[in-house]
Image (cartoon, grey):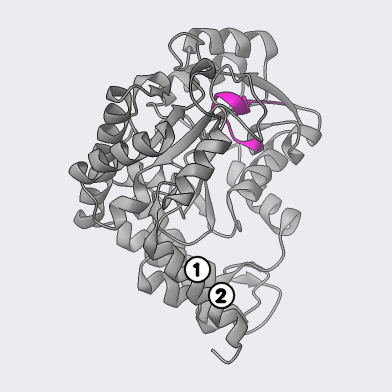
Amino acid sequence: MKDREVGRLIAEERKRQKKVINLIASENYVSKDVLEALGSELTNKYAEGYSKSRYYGGNEVVDKIEDLCRKRALKLFKLSPAEWHVNVQPLSGSPANVAVYLALVPPGGKIMGMNLSDGGHLTHGHRVSITGKVWQQISYGVNPKTEVLDYEEIDRIAEREKPQLIVAGFTAYPRIIYFEKFREMADRCGAYLIADMSHLAGLVAGGVYPSPFPHTDVVTTTTHKTLRGPRAALIFSRIDDREIYKKIDKAVFPGLQGGPHLNQIAAAAVALKEADSAAFRKYAKQVVANAKILASELKRLGWKVISGGTDSHLILLNTWMDGNGISGREAGIRLEKNGIIVNKNTVPGESRSPVDPSGIRLGTAAETTRGRKEKDFVAIAGRIDKILRN
């Protein structure tokens, strides 16, 4: 690279990534093919609009790329193109969720989503997000004793509040989501049901986590977490007489975005093909196996694992332990100084500030990509325990 300063910083980051143990649940490592697509000449092309309906010329190739990405997305999740539509243009997960709300819920309408401290995402209606400023969040959480979703209580909230849209999907909830129960709630109160499977997409594709598609109207996902692709997003929507998919397409463009990032879409297409393989299904199975052993070891070592374990790639650890441990911020700092990267995170019933919460969030997707197995995560749990107790 001629720009030596930027080149040096990229090399520095490459070196950093190689030398740490990465337990960030939202991160992963992409293939060389994904990186090649991201850095390709597709960066040069502006293609405002959708395939076969652009506002600029010279789109005969990029139309094929966008069509291919859509085809691969439907194939990976075993969806019929007669029943499901997918928009591959969202730049990331947050604008994807905003686009769905913009399409389906009038300003001031009610969005029912999980509260932030119990594992919800900012874009599920939190007050500091645009989603909590334009729409009204009706929040639900976990049972304070079991730390898992109480579907009967969530149903009572839905019946009382009558939201226009319910979000099933989380950023820090480690257990199975029973999408069929959310479907029943949505039907009873006349709401759209959207699943945000951003953290779960690779596990769903790999057949180790229940699919939301049989039960939902819309599914949003990022592609860079367990799906092991670029930083991008997809919106799947049912094709029926409600014409949800047309409303969502209009919300993405021209509602929120201009020209799509074709290099990003091509890289997502590469990742989707990689995920549609026996090797990826084996990987997804190993991700969950590694998470389960990491959770059980940390629990055995005396740490409070939220909900007692995990069914996914994600573990939520209460390091504060009612004042008998250390804060999530301090835990993150200590671990990073010793080469283990995590993120501080709120826990159910949070009593501390979000900037210095009671816990940390761990994920196994990135290190599983590097080839780590159960025995490696037993050792990682031991290192975490030693670092935090010292």
Residue extent of the magenta highlight:
110-122
The image quarter containing residue 297 is top left
- In the rendered structure, the answer to whether residue 374 lies left or right of residue 31 reads left
Q: Residue at x 60, y 20 (%)?
A: 350
In this view of the protein, which residue sits in the foreground, 315 or 90? 315
* Residue 208 visible, this orientation: no
Q: Amino acid at mark 1?
A: Glu
Q: Residue at x 63, y 47 (%)?
A: 94
In this view of the protein, which residue sits in the foreground, 315 or 123? 315
Q: Residue at x 63, y 19 (%)?
A: 351
State the mark number for residue 13. 1
Asked if 20 appears above or below 172 in the picture, the reply is: below
How busy is the neighbourhood of tag 2: few (under 14 within 10 Å), some, or many (20 plus)? few
- Does the residue at mark 2 contact the one at mark 1 (Cβ under 8 Å)? yes
Q: Quadrant of the C terminus?
A: top left
- In the rendered structure, the answer to whether residue 122 lies left or right of residue 135 reads left
Query: What residue did someone put label 2 on?
Result: 9
Say what secondary structure mark 1 lies in.
helix
Q: Amino acid at mark 2?
A: Leu
